[in-house]
Image (cartoon, rainbow, N blue to C red):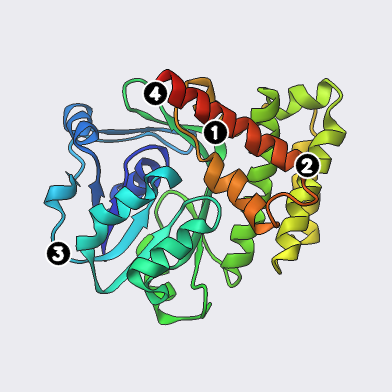
């Protein structure tokens, strides 16, 4: 299977690199600056599951995309989705499948509209990963899960093809029979985590230690209620696990959105926080989520005013 990985940042670089390590037919679609960096330093992964270096990973820029891919692994940030779609569209043929690993749900509508829902799978990943100043991909935690599924037919031949292509690489792959539900559950968790850690500019444990555990739980409850109102109430197991993670006074957990904000970068706040509010009638009954979304809108407004 010919796999086109859109992006070679933390997510795309990690999972695409592991597939390359496993001998898969992988190409990375990247911007010119990233292509030049990869040509100079190679693709480097540093992880507790094992380091990997490919000195010359196969990479193309938008102008070099040609011929259909069998699978497009889409790992861009939400605010880059429109540009990414335009860049990889020439690689989408009649039998191409698209596996997006973006957070939230809004990207599915954009991909369905452009390519048709039959080509677009559901997917998510569970990993903490980033890049250092030299472009090396750093794996921060002990989880590297990739979950995917057919949104309409969990037992379809097409998801079986994807499973065969992704299996036996050095990450944990799981095929979900309820991928849309799992995507909603992840959205609820990251909205609560991103909302509170960005609002308080602190890790979960810091907020709990300061006496804010009940605030975190109220925000989490708001997010759960929105999902339930849209027909996707989080499971009891997910709620229990999430509450444990979000109320642990020793936790250093903080959202990547906070790390982006601390370095003055764009964030996915609209795709994660504001989009969830829109699903819940624009904040009715969700005052804490509304405040968190407003906080990040103010951050965006300041960036725009200061010309960031």
Q: Secondary structure at mark 3?
A: loop
Residues 23 and 73: in front is 73
Residue 76 spot, x, y in % from top left? 38, 46
The circle drawn on residue 287 is: 2
Q: Residues within 10 Å of mark 3 (few under 14, many from 20)?
A: few
Query: Disc 3 and disc 4: Cα gap in Å?
Result: 33 Å
Residue at point 17% right, 27% down?
Answer: 40
Query: Disc 3 and disc 1: Cα gap in Å?
Result: 34 Å
Q: Nearer the viewer, mark 2 or mark 3?
A: 2
Residue at point 58% right, 66% down?
Answer: 180
Query: Disc 4 and disc 1: Cα gap in Å?
Result: 14 Å
The mark that comes first in sequence, 4 or 1, is 4
Q: Residues within 10 Å of mark 4 (few under 14, many from 20)?
A: few
* Residue 77 appearing in the image: no
Q: Secondary structure at mark 1?
A: helix
Query: Disc 4 and disc 2: Cα gap in Å?
Result: 36 Å
Q: Residues within 10 Å of mark 2 (few under 14, many from 20)?
A: some
Q: Nearer the viewer, mark 4 or mark 2?
A: 2
The residue pinned by badge 1 equals 256
The mark that comes first in sequence, 3 or 1, is 3
Q: Are marks 3 and 1 in contact (CB under 8 Å)?
A: no
Q: Secondary structure at mark 4?
A: loop
- Relative horizontal placement of residue 100, taking residue 53 as reference (left or right): right
Quarter of the picture holding the N terminus: bottom left
Query: Disc 2 and disc 1: Cα gap in Å?
Result: 23 Å
- Relative horizontal placement of residue 139, taking residue 31 as reference (left or right): right
């Amino acid at each position: 299977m010919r796999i086109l990985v859109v992006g070679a940042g933390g997510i795309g670089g990690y999972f695409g690199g592991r597939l390359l390590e496993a001998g898969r037919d992988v190409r990375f679609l990247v911007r010119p600056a990233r292509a030049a960096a990869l040509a100079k330093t190679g693709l480097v992964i540093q992880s507790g599951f094992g380091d990997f270096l490919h000195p010359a990973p196969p990479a193309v820029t938008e102008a070099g995309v040609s011929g259909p891919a069998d699978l497009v692994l889409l790992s861009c940030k939400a605010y880059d989705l429109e540009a990414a779609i335009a860049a990889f569209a020439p690689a989408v043929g009649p039998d191409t499948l698209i596996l997006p690993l973006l957070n939230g749900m809004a990207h599915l509508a954009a991909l369905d509209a452009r390519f048709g829902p039959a080509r677009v799978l559901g997917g998510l990943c569970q990993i903490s990963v980033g890049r250092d100043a030299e472009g090396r991909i750093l794996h921060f935690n002990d989880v590297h899960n990739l979950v995917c599924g057919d949104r309409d037919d969990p037992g379809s031949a097409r998801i079986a093809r994807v499973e065969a292509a992704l299996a036996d690489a050095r990450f944990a792959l799981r095929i979900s029979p309820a991928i849309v539900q799992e995507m909603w559950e992840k959205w609820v968790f990251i909205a609560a985590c991103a909302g509170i850690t960005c609002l308080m500019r602190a890790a979960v444990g810091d907020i709990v230690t300061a006496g804010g555990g009940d605030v975190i739980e109220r925000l989490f409850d708001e997010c759960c209620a929105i999902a339930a109102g849209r027909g996707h109430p989080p499971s009891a197991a997910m709620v229990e696990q999430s509450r444990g993670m979000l109320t642990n006074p020793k936790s250093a957990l903080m959202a990547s959105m906070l790390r982006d904000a601390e370095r003055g970068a764009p964030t996915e706040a609209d795709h994660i926080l504001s989009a969830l509010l829109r699903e819940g009638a624009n904040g009715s009954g969700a005052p804490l989520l509304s405040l968190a979304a407003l906080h990040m809108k103010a951050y965006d407004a300041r960036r725009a005013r200061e010309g960031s």
